[in-house]
Each structure stands twice: as structure tokens, then as C-alpha cells.
Image (spheres, coloured by chain):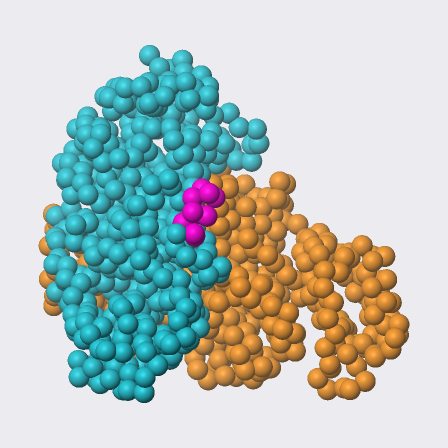
Chain colours: A orange, B cyan
């Protein structure tokens, strides 16, 4: 009934032979036509020919559900059927796959589960949905024998889910760590380059469109934690364990610490880090010092990069844009091309949703952050008194915190104070925190210490 | 008959549930047990459990063909059947897939074609074989409906073939460029860091095992050209066109140019570059100046990195070890895991060998190097005469070569000479070469000019 409205996806240049039209097209229904949806529509149209030449199958956008029909019509014209009822898409008898790019976790969850129950495959770029409701959704997909693909949910332009699930399938993965939120990386790059405060850098990022009006999910690290949840699941064969991620954002970050770190040869990045230990995992998102000559240090602006350490392949890294309309479309359509190949074969011939066979996925205990061992950057504002430094060093030594480097800087605002910066050897967080509490109680130490974790990632 | 010798791949830890043993194992025959073969054996054993938990299928190494049986037995013991007749492997009735890791292009070609004719799938890490005989081999595989997989042939630890073929399938790819030979990158890193000559850096690389006794294929750029051939084929839907690649190695590179480039903010890397134009391709391997703050500039030692520019995803980069026993095994086994999923389905459900449907692959004309436009680094050793620089600038201006930057350095060995270094705007190579010939004929210009191409790659 919607056949009249089909997009024809005509293209001008003809460098590749036509695909075999004997094979039925992949019939797509889309939920949402915002930034990602419009990008997906645009790329499906512009690159219809190369996509078909690769996949061997034509992509046919059957129907799009939107909230604002008029706005949507201004994008797709009359080439695609539009509806304001998303259930019309997920219940549509002539749709093979539902592309969920509407966002949110309530209605999106309902619609995705309905689509699955209707035997439809799902492609989504919704990291929050899968980080929170992934276990329920993947179990439903497994039971129905349908695919739920989500390359666009993590570091959009980079095929990192594919690299983890397929490219590194021979490996035991030791850790995954990366810059997986473009907004915070843009803000941190600005703070470093211009010495700006967090508030000023955020305002600049909002003005330039790199941060949303409500930036909470980005700057508090929640978005990165959603992505880290999915990376960890694919790396270690665990279900999404979002509620187990230790999350710290960048809102408390002081520009002075970024500047001192820089002078000591380090850069501050918001990293998502997932490590596998013998009996459990570390899952954490926090600002982190990395060496200035580390590859991650040169990932600037809104770019993303993910590093993977595995036992056979060693260290590999994947770099690209972490957001954007067509950048996300690239991932969504790659999932559609994969699906076009395997939609007609039995489930066991497909790549499992979370890298491991569904029956092999088992939760692992996640270490409390207090148990996690990292090196630390500490900054104390101290009085210029003769005994201050020996006292600080004594407290740390007695607590079992080894100091690797000590440097005093002039305090920016107060000529009576020094900024005492210390870099430590790796030490358990509970030990470090206890020592810092003692330091803050010393008579010559003013206010609270700045504490930032450091990672080598080699 | 070889069942007695099967490897059991027992592993100690049991973090994942056993795979479904109802599905028959993937039965593997291997040609060669050198560095890559031994690494593949080791990783298949050590990681049998995670590999099966991902693939849903056990990997069963049935037979290995080697030249030296005693040496091979010292590696695999009695766990695997050994033979010194490679035809015993490719003709074996109980082998599904032949892993070709013997190298060479003559016997390897025969054996691979025989395996395909016998209806067996092939996994190979042999870049030379596919760059030179790829069209024949892929056509035979297409006709037989079998898979020829080769992730290990390019930048071994990095799943770059998968990224190009599958991860970026929505995109028109504009160019692929990368550091795809670890030996030369190690040598260039040493020349830059230590100011060593090419000969000394090569000797050091040989002593440390980063270069072979006969390093010709590496240092002359042939190995990089093999890999570039396969990258271009997957990026653009063209057959392997190795004989069309313009190849320059690093043997003629002067340490003084590396030092001058560094002082001007550039680093010299051996790059493989494949660009798509409206009506054809550029395929070239040569030493190249890239900006010191470019991501490729920080790819040091024997590491590899490949950048891809595509219309939707934008710029993405993939980084990892470019050689090594287990690093290559990681790619070979990833191909085996992919195969384990799709060996029992029809050919159209699999990823095409060269990214595009076989029927859609068509050669594109490759531009002669004289037609290619790049920016240039020029060094002229010039007499300290008043009119030298104006003469040089006049020749270049008349030839249509625009100078972007000019700097004179003291000549290292001759107080009467200056090293005149020029960076140009992009200009066709034939124009540049004609101008350089004129420059070399000037009275105050001594000897031959150093010429190196520059790339922005953004």
C-alpha cells in the first residue's frame, strides 16, 4: 500500500554494474528523521549505487515515522511514506528492518521490542537504550531469531563494534579505553589550548553546536558510560552492565590542573576504560592524564578514538568522528548492508549481538572503584612554609603512596601559596583517598586536593 | 584417518560456557608452519575457548604441510598430523578450509587454485600472491562458490580489510593512505631520531629482527605496493592492479632531508596512497612529508596505520602492529571465525572478496605518475652567490611552480654551499620535474636536487 511512495534512489554516475535485481530489496522502516535519520536518508539516496554494488541488494525505505510530518516532508518530499504513528512502522507487514533513530529509552524500548516480537530486525544508534535495556532487547532478539545491530551507538564513524566483535575474534581482550564523547573532548581541547574554564569552554561548544543546550549527559560522563557499557560487553562477553560503571564527568575539572599536567608532559582526556582481570572487570569513565606523546593525546576537537589491548593482535587503535549526521548514517547503513546479507539465513550464521554466543554471555563482577589501582596526579595548595613538603611526603610514605614526581608551581592567585603537584605510582584508590584526607588535614595545606587518575595505556 | 592426531585445544580457565557442539567443527588444513603458521597454531590452542564462544564452532586443525617435518614436530608435538606434501592438504577430503601461510607466489598459487577447485575455502596472509594473482584467484573462488579471505595480508593486526569492506560499506571512498610497511617505518623512525643514514638504520633493523636479510621487497616499497593494491581494490571496487602502482622505496633517502623536513615541521614516512578521481585512480608508494602534528607522524617504529577518507564517515584511522607472529594469527583466525559462520550458506550471503559484488568489479585507469599533482619538498645545494636564489625563483615561477616556503640551511659538509629548501604548492609532477631539470642546469646549483612529495591527508 505504500509502494507508490517508494524512493527510487536514482543516481547520476554509473561506475559500477547494477546489482542483481533478482534478489528482493531490503525493506526499511525508520523511526525518527532527526539529525541521524535525515543523514541516513541522504546517504541511502546519494550512495544507493555503491551500496547496492557492495551488498548485492537494493535498500528500499518504505516508511518513516516522525513527530512533525510537515518538517519531514520538507526533507524527503514525496519519495517516502510518512506517518506520525510509530506503531505503523513496527507493525508494517512489508518492512524487514526497523531503523530506530528517534532516541530516548521509554517509547524507543517499547517500539524496538514490538518490532522484534513482529519478527523484524532492528538497527539502532541508541546507546542509552542498549546500555540500559540491552539484556532484555538482545534476549528478545535471540528468542525471535532476529538481528539487533548498533554500530552507530558507539563512536559513530568508526566501525569499532565490528572490530571488537569480528576483527579481534581470535583474541582475549585485556582492556578497551578511549575517547568516546566528542563534546567533552572538544571542551577539554579548548580548555587546554586557550586556558579557558570549563564554563567558558562549554558555552563556546554550545555556541558552535558541539554541545547541546542541556549538556548534562555529555559533560557528566553518562553518554561515555553508555558507550563503554557496549564496548565492554563486546570485549568480554558480559551483558550490558551500565549501572556498574563508575562515572565522573569533567564539570569539576580546574583549568589550572590541565595547565600543570601539560607542563609535566601530560594531557587530560575524558576516557572510558574497561579492563578485564582474572576474576572481574573495571568499568569507569573519568578525566585521565595520558602522556602527551601518547596517540590518544593527539585526538583533538570532537574526534573519538578507541584503543584495544588484546593478547594476539597487541595494541590497536580506531579513530574517527564521534558524532554527526552522515557519520552516524555510515554506521547505520553498514549495519543494513550486513543485514541484507544475512537476513535470509538462520541465526547461527550471523555474528552474535554481543560478540559471544548468547549462551556464553555471563556477567562478571565489577570492582568497586575503591579497589581500582591507578597512578595519580595530586595538587595541593600549600603555604610556603619550610616543613610543608616533608610533612606531605611523610603522610604519603606512611600511607603506602609512592611519589614518582614532585613539582611546585607558583599559585595563580595567591603569592603566599604554592601549588604542590605530585604524581604517584599506581596505588589502590581507597589507599590514595585515605592519604589525601590526611593531607587535607595538615595545617599548611589549604582547601581540598585536586585528584586525577593517570593511565599508561600501552 | 588423521583423527588420531587431532589437537584437543584443551584450555585451563573456563570463563565462558562451552559452544554448541552439535555444530560440526571447522576443519582446517594449513600450508606452512613458519612465523605466521606457528603463531596461528599457538593462538588457536591458547584461545580455543573464547574463539569457540564467539564463533559457535570449534576449530579443528586437521593437517599441516611443512618442508621440515622434524622442526614442525618440535612445535606441534603429536597433536596435529604433519605432512611434507602440500597436496595432501589441499586434496584432503576432511578439510573445509586451507590456511595458506607458506608465502611465495608460484607454488602457493598452484595450491590455492587447487584447493579452490576442490571446493575448499582459503584463508591466506599472502599479499604478494593476491596482489599479483588476485584476479585469477578471486574469479576461481567466485565460480566455485568458496571464500578467499585475507585480512592477514594487510597491516596484520588491524582489521582494515573488514573496515573497508564492511564497516564503510555506505561510503564512497575518496582515498586510502597509510604506513603499511613496518620495516621501512622502523628505519625511518631511526633515521629521524638518531640522524642515522639509511644504510646504518637498515643494519640496525636487521640486527633487531625488524628487517630481513634480503630487505629488498620492504625497502624498495614492493611490499607496501602489494598491500596498497588490496586496499585500493576494496576501497574502489577495482581488481588488484599491482602492475599499475608507482613504487619508490626509501633506499635513496638522504638523512639530511629528513632533518630539514623535521626543522620545517614535517616528518618523512613511506606511504601507500590510493586516490579516486572522477575518471580514474592514483596508486603510489613513495616517501612522503606529512605535517609533524598529523596523526600519521606519530606512528613510530614498526607500527602501521591506515587512513580512509570517505564521503559519509569522513576521516577514520586504523592503527596497530604491521607484522608479527600472533598479530598475523589474529587476522587469520578472525577470517576463520567469519568463515565458520558462513561456510554453510550460499555465496550471496557472504561478504564479497573485494568488497563489491563480483559482477560490479571493473578496472579503472590509473594515472601515470607524471600526471599526479602533489606539493613538493625540494632541496638544492647552491653556491653562496648573490643571484642564486632569484635565479631559482625565476625558473620556478616561469615553469608555473609556486613556492610556499623557502629556507636556506648551512650545508653540512661544505662551507661554500647552502642547502636551499623549498616547499611548493601542489603541481603536476611533469611540471615539477621539468622545472627541476632546469634548476639543476643553473650554474650555481651543484649536483642533483632532492625531491620529495608532500601530502596533507585531511
Q: Nearer the viewer, residue B240 or B43?
A: B240
Rendered position, B443 above or below A414: above
Res B134 → quadrant: top left
A34 sits to left or right of A395: left
- Which of the 4 image quadrants contains residue B81? top left
Left or right, B260 with respect to A284, comes to left
Observer able to see residue A355: no
A81 or A8, which is in the foreground?
A8
Measured from the top left, where is residue B169 in percent x and y? 27, 56
Question: Split into 4 quadrants, where in the image is the N terminus of chain A?
Answer: bottom left
Q: Is residue A8 left or right of residue B249?
A: left
Which percent across, then down, holds residue B149? 28, 40
* Residue A301 in sight in this render: yes
- Up/down of A227 relative to B45, above or below: below
Residue at x 45%, y 24% (from the top left corner):
B75
In this rendering, the answer to whether A226 lies above or below A349 is below
B242 and B363: which is toward the camera: B242
| Depth check, front residue: B14 or A132 | B14
Give the magenta range. Answer: B200-209
Q: Specify whether A191 is left or right of B444.
A: right
Residue in the image at 34% along x and 44% along y: B215
Residue B216: x, y in percent?
30, 45
Residue B307, image x, y percentages: 34, 60
The quadrant in which residue A441 appears is bottom right
Which residue is drawn at the image coordinates 43% and 38% (left, top)?
Answer: B325
Q: Residue at x 83, y 79 (%)?
A: A383
Residue A99 falls inside the magenta stretch: no
Overall secondary structure of the magenta section = helix
Count the labels in the image: 0
Amino acid at each position: 500500500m505504500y509502494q507508490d511512495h517508494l524512493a527510487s534512489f536514482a543516481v547520476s554516475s554509473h561506475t559500477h554494474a547494477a546489482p542483481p535485481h533478482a534478489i528482493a530489496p531490503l525493506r526499511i522502516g525508520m523511526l525518527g528523521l532527526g539529525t541521524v535519520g535525515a543523514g541516513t536518508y541522504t546517504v541511502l539516496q546519494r550512495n544507493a549505487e555503491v551500496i547496492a554494488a557492495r551488498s548485492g541488494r537494493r535498500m528500499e525505505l518504505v516508511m518513516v515515522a516522525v513527530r512533525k510530518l510537515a518538517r519531514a516532508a520538507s526533507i524527503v518530499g514525496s519519495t517516502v511514506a510518512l506517518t506520525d504513528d510509530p506503531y505503523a512502522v513496527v507493525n508494517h507487514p512489508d518492512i524487514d528492518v526497523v531503523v530506530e533513530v528517534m532516541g530516548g529509552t521509554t517509547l524507543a524500548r517499547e517500539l524496538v521490542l514490538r518490532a522484534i516480537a513482529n519478527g523484524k530486525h532492528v538497527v539502532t544508534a541508541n546507546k542509552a537504550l542498549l546500555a540500559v535495556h540491552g539484556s532484555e532487547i538482545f534476549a528478545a532478539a535471540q528468542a525471535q531469531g532476529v538481528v539487533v545491530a548498533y554500530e552507530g551507538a558507539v563512536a559513530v564513524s568508526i566501525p569499532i563494534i565490528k572490530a571488537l566483535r569480528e576483527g579481534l575474534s581470535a583474541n582475549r581482550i585485556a582492556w578497551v579505553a578511549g575517547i568516546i564523547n566528542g563534546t567533552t573532548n572538544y571542551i577539554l581541547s579548548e580548555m587546554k589550548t586557550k586556558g579557558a574554564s570549563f564554563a567558558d569552554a562549554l558555552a563556546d561548544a554550545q555556541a558552535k553546536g558541539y554541545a547541546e543546550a542541556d549538556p548534562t549527559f555529555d559533560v557528566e560522563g553518562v553518554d561515555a558510560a553508555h558507550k563503554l557499557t557496549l564496548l565492554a560487553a563486546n570485549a568480554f562477553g558480559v551483558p550490558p552492565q551500565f549501572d556498574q560503571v563508575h562515572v565522573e564527568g569533567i564539570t569539576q575539572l580546574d583549568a589550572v590542573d590541565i595547565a600543570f599536567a601539560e607542563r609535566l608532559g601530560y594531557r587530560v582526556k575524558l576516557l572510558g576504560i574497561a579492563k578485564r582481570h582474572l576474576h572481574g572487570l573495571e568499568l569507569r569513565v573519568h578525566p585521565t592524564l595520558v602522556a602527551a606523546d601518547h596517540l590518544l593525546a593527539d585526538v583533538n576537537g570532537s574526534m573519538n578514538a578507541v584503543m584495544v589491548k588484546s593478547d594476539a593482535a597487541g595494541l590497536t587503535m580506531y579513530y574517527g568522528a564521534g558524532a554527526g549526521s552522515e557519520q552516524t548514517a555510515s554506521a547505520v547503513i553498514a549495519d543494513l548492508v550486513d543485514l541484507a546479507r544475512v537476513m535470509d539465513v538462520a541465526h547461527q550464521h550471523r555474528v552474535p549481538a554481543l560478540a559471544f554466543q548468547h549462551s556464553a554471555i555471563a556477567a562478571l563482577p565489577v570492582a568497586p572503584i575503591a579497589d581500582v589501582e591507578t597512578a595519580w596526579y595530586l595538587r595541593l595548595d600549600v603555604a610556603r612554609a619550610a616543613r610543608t613538603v616533608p610533612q606531605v611526603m611523610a603522610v604519603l610514605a606512611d600511607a603506602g603512596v609512592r611519589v614518582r614526581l614532585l613539582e611546585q608551581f607558583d599559585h595563580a592567585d595567591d603569592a603566599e601559596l604554592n601549588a604542590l603537584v605530585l604524581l604517584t605510582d599506581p596505588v589502590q584508590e581507597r589507599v590514595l583517598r585515605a592519604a589525601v584526607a590526611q593531607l587535607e588535614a595538615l595545617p599548611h595545606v589549604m582547601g581540598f586536593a585536586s585528584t586525577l587518575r593517570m593511565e599508561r595505556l600501552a
